[in-house]
Amino acid sequence: MIKSVLFALTLFAVSGSAAMAQTALTSEEKAACRPDAMKLCSASVGKPAQMNACLRDNKAKLSEGCRKVVEAHGG
């Protein structure tokens, strides 16, 4: 029973943070981050949650435009 409750809470927390991280990016936002994503986070291409985490983790190394996008989406 406790495992079921913990699993449900974990699933809820993950889905909530994933929903925030998954807000739709405009084509301009994608273009602003594409070079940084390819340079710093190429292993995460095609994995949105991992890409978001990688960009947040590398925020200090991002171009100004991409940093603004990451910050606008909670990073």
Image: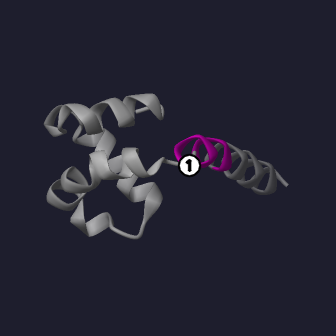
User: Is residue 69 placed above or below 43 in the rendered structure?
Assistant: above
Residue 39 vs residue 31, the one in the foreground: 31
Whole-percent x, y for residue 47 in the image: 42, 66
Q: Is residue 50 left or right of residue 18?
A: left
Residue 49 percent across, percent down from the top left: 46, 56
Membership of 17 in magenta stretch: yes
Residue drawn where x is 28% and y is 39% of the image: 66
x 37%, y 36%: residue: 70
Query: Which quadrant of the rendered structure holds the C terminus?
Result: top left
Q: Determine crowd level at label 1: few under 14, some 14-19, many 20+ residues with C-alpha closer than 10 A.
A: few
**Residue furthest out toward the right:** 1
Q: Residue sitting at 47 percent across and 35 percent down?
A: 73
Work out which quarter of the rendered image holds the N terminus and state it: bottom right
Q: Residue at x 28, y 33 (%)?
A: 67
Residue type, numbered disc 1: Ala
Q: Which residue is mark 1?
A: 24
Does dot 1 land on a helix, a strand or a loop?
A: loop
**Pick the front one: 1 or 11:** 11
Q: Relative to 68, say whether 9 is above or below.
A: below
Q: Position of residue 4 (x, y in %)?
A: 80, 56
Q: Quadrant of residue 39?
A: bottom left
Question: Magenta residues: mostly which secondary structure?
Answer: helix
Q: How many marks?
A: 1
Q: Residue 63, percent across and down?
A: 17, 37
- Left or right, residue 29 beside residue 26: left
Residue 3 vs residue 68: left or right? right
What is the magenta range?
15-22
Query: How are the residues colored?
Result: one colour
* 16 inside magenta stretch: yes
Residue furthest out toward the front? 28
